[in-house]
Amino acid sequence: MKIISAEFIKSAVDPAHCPKEGIPEIAFAGRSNVGKSSLINSLLNRKNLVKTSSTPGKTQLINFFKINNQFFFVDLPGYGFARVPVAIKKNWGKMIETYLEKRKNLKMVVLILDIRHKPTDDDRLMAAWLDFHKIHTVFVANKSDKVKKSEKNKKIRSILEFLEKKEKKVIIFSSKDREGKKDLWRVIENFIR
């Protein structure tokens, strides 16, 4: 995909605040500090369009980025570990759930996992929730540049077993060395057509 334009449009907390355009949306979900912002920036060939931080929990709203005036990338707040009050975390859960359930333009969710670590119970819960609601999901094992090449397949098998998704494919991705970028774009393009 050739990126001609990519711009932040707005942040939202509920469907009433979401953009009204009827164009496709691809949402990005994952636990706090999984590298969601870096992954999106890498896909868009941008350094700082989506704000990155070393402090988990910086994304606290649903952020919409319009790509090529044809579709949106939607950055969802991270779940799990984040240095924010419990009340805010609870609101994130409701906000994310409402968006995922009610948004008619949502075509697919990119569920990002850290290849270095076993998925958490929150990851499994999110995968099961998306499955239950029949939301198309692609699994991405991020930060692959931090794992030895010989360990990658073993890590992927472990992720699939833990998520109970043995039949699914996982895209191995690295924002640093661009591994998996073409594979992920291929999947995304199928859903925005």
Image: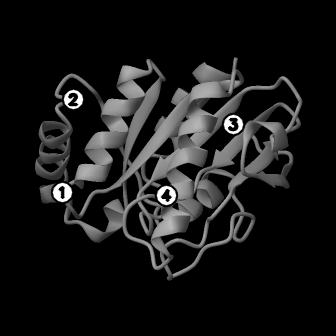
Helix, strand or loop for disc 2: loop
The location of residue 114, given as percent across then percent down, is 32, 59
The residue pinned by badge 2 equals: 165
Along the line of sight, the residue nearer the viewer: 131 or 188:
131
- Separation of marks 3 and 1 at Cα, in angstroms: 31 Å
Left or right of residue 174, residue 158 in this image: left
Helix, strand or loop for disc 3: loop
- Kindly identify the residue that appears in the image at 19 percent across and 65 percent down: 148
- Separation of marks 4 and 1 at Cα, in angstroms: 24 Å
Q: Is residue 141 visible to us here? A: yes
| Residue 188 occupies quadrant | top right
Q: Mark 4 packing: few (<14 Cα in 10 Å), some, or many (20+)? A: few
Residue 1 circle label: 3
Q: Mark 2 packing: few (<14 Cα in 10 Å), some, or many (20+)? A: some
Kind of residue at badge 2: Lys
The location of residue 108, given as percent across then percent down, is 55, 28
- Kindly identify the residue that appears in the image at 69 percent across and 64 percent down: 50
The location of residue 3, given as percent across then percent down, is 77, 45
Kind of residue at badge 1: Lys
Helix, strand or loop for disc 1: loop
The residue pinned by badge 1 equals: 118
Q: Is residue 67 visible to us here? A: no
- Separation of marks 4 and 2 at Cα, in angstroms: 27 Å
Q: Nearer the viewer, mark 2 or mark 3?
A: 2
Residue 90 circle label: 4
Kind of residue at badge 4: Lys
The location of residue 184, given as percent across then percent down, is 50, 38
Kind of residue at badge 3: Met
Q: Mark 1 packing: few (<14 Cα in 10 Å), some, or many (20+)? A: some
